[in-house]
Image (spheres, helix red, strand yellow):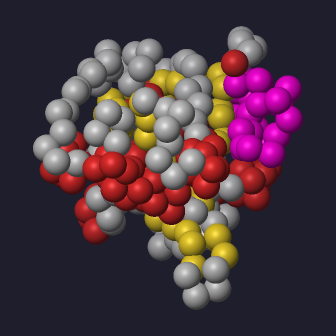
Amino acid sequence: TDGILLAEVRKDRDLLEYDTLIIDEAHERSLNIDFLLGYCHQLLSRRPDLKLIVTSATIDPARFSRHFGDAPVIEVSGRTYPVEVRYRPPAEASVGERDESMQQAIVDAIDELSLDGRGDILVFLSGEREIRETAETLRKHRLLDSEVIPLYARLSPRDQARVFAASGRRHIVLSTNVAETSLTVPGIRYVIDSGFARISRYSARSKIQRLPIERISQASAEQRTGRCGRVAAGISIRLYDEEDLTARAAY
């Protein structure tokens, strides 16, 4: 992981115990990832024998290749099914997932997908509090033949394992972006994307790491959409409009 690699750099500036490094999910652009990419760029001049592999489903490979001295680009295409993208912004401008308008938009999106057919639904939210509130909203909505499953880092391993257990009912998984990059939830046919996430940011002035809720990038939106094209043709509902997406950062 990036944290382990940073710890290794402190012990061994030239990473002499390693012959190959893999920097995964480079599109996330966290402070750790950006620092490691810059550090490895300098390290390669001292260690020409070191192999560096940078991977991501959504980065601009040409730019990364140029940055690392025209490094070769290897594309690995997996099998994906077509995904229809629908834009369903809330009726009123929303500043967060806990707004009444956004909660209603999530309920309406689930109702719309329920009419399309059976299949599990993955709802992307920014954090535990937002997940708990949405779960309560859906409980009051009384969904038929569906099971709401929260998924976030602080859950016990037993509770997290519920996403893998078949129940005979439709799973509606309410997840943070752990389901975007760190964990593949099986059986997902539909995705609902709130457009928000907690993004790791470092403040140089206060010297602290923060996790503010921000609008996700275009790359993250594509990554989330791709979660529903793995088992069959799917539908991704984005709870924002296309102009909003175009105005967001690319990565």
Q: Give the residue displayed 21% in from the left and 53% down from the top.
A: 67
Q: Which sits in the foreground, 217 or 84?
A: 217
In the image, residue 81 sits, relative to residue 52, either above or below, namely above
Residue 204 % position (x, y): 55, 82
Residue 155 % position (x, y): 82, 40
Q: Give the residue displayed 48% in from the left and 73% down from the top.
A: 93
The magenta-colored residue range is: 137-163
Residue 148 % position (x, y): 73, 34
Residue 81 % position (x, y): 32, 20
Q: Dividing the picture into quarters, in which one does residue 39 lie?
A: bottom left
Q: Dividing the picture into quarters, in which one does residue 233 lie?
A: top left
Asked whether residue 74 is drawn in magenta, I would say: no
Asked whether residue 150 is drawn in magenta, I would say: yes
Q: Which sits in the foreground, 121 or 218?
A: 218
Q: Quadrant of the C terminus?
A: bottom left
Task: Mark yes or no: residue 118 visible.
Answer: yes
Q: Give the residue displayed 66% in from the left and 76% down from the top.
A: 208
Q: Which sits in the foreground, 201 or 86?
A: 201
Q: Quadrant of the N terminus?
A: top right
Task: Mark yes or no: residue 196 visible.
Answer: no
| Horizontal relation, residue 4 to residue 84: left or right | right
In the image, residue 47 sits, relative to residue 20, either above or below, namely below
Residue at the farthest bottom position: 205
Count of numbered badges drawn on the protein: 0
In the image, residue 178 sits, relative to residue 104, either above or below, namely above
| Horizontal relation, residue 138 to residue 47: left or right | right
Q: Which sits in the foreground, 145 or 122?
A: 122
Q: Give the residue displayed 13% in from the left and 44% down from the top.
A: 70
